[in-house]
Image (cartoon, rainbow, N blue to C red):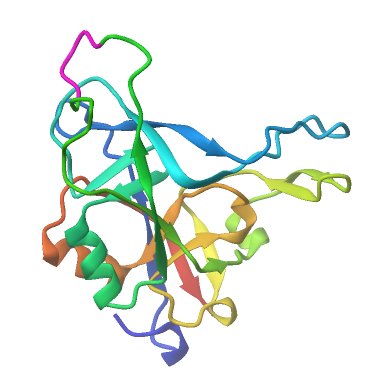
Amino acid sequence: MRSARSGVRAVNIYLLDDPAKPAEYARFSSVGTWTEDRICNVCGEPTARLIEPLQIEWDEGTDHIGDFSWGGYHCVVLDAVRAFLESKAFEVKFGDVQVKRPTERAKRPRVQFPYRGPHLSWLTPTARLKLDEEKSGVRVISDCSACEQRRYSFKRDGLVLPETSWNGEKVFLIDQFGRSRATFVTEEALTMLVREGFSNLCPRPAGTIES
């Protein structure tokens, strides 16, 4: 894939999504750790955010853990994924994960507690790129001066990033999507992941980086 800076063509980007096949790979719910749970007294929106350690409960459906595991857009990975991403200088950091006791008795298969499975790391992209808001069709839905949170409509496709905001990052978050952990990769980065054969990935075309 040629860079958008070459003037040949745009760079395709993809959203790394949850395949949502509970019978195939285990999913989880994020249950902590949260910063102080506070509601903004002006806009009424929560201001808490997740910090380390990421505390998870495995959902019902299967006890089979993939290389990538998903809880919404939060992602935990096995050591093989972590080692690969670090060796290829992907723009990510890794946090600790704690598996918590399930709050309800399972009626279907679930990863056993106490957890004795493979080591898990919380994957978070460190790069944040800005959309071309007009071309992407996203809009501001709230802008609170009290908690300083500006919220945009969320889209999974049709996104356009100007090449001036991109410095060759392979993986990134979208700045306008705030605290969302929706993770995007370039086509080159996706090809690298696919070649490694990592399980439990569902890449979706999300847009382009273009001049």
Identify the image quadrant of residue 103.
top left
Quadrant occupied by the C terminus: bottom right
What residue is shown at x 70% (from left), y 49% (from top)? 139
Q: Main secondary structure of the magenta part?
A: loop
In the depicted view, which residue is nearer to us: 89 or 17? 89
Q: Compare residues 73 and 134 and report the one nearer the observer.
A: 73
Q: Residue 72: which quarter of the image?
A: top left
Vertical comparison of 184 with 169: above or below: above
- Decide which of 88, 204 is in the foreground and name it: 88
Q: Position of residue 68 (x, y in %)?
A: 25, 48
Q: Position of residue 169 (x, y in %)?
A: 43, 76
Report whether 195 appears left or right of 101.
left
**Quadrant that contains the N terminus:** bottom left
Q: Which residue is drawn at the image coordinates 13% and 66% (left, top)?
A: 195
Q: Which residues are magenta?
A: 106-110
Residue at x-position 49% and y-position 35%: 32
Q: Position of residue 163 (x, y in %)?
A: 53, 79
In this rendering, does residue 98 appear at all? yes
Picture layout, residue 189 above or below residue 44: below
Residue situated in front as seen by the camera: 136 or 201 = 201
Residue 115 is left or right of residue 125, and the answer is left
- The image quarter containing residue 183 is bottom left
**123 w.r.t. 44: above or below:** below
Q: Is residue 129 magenta?
A: no
Q: Is residue 206 visible?
A: no
| Left or right of residue 38, residue 181 in this image | left
Q: Is residue 62 above or below residue 66?
A: above
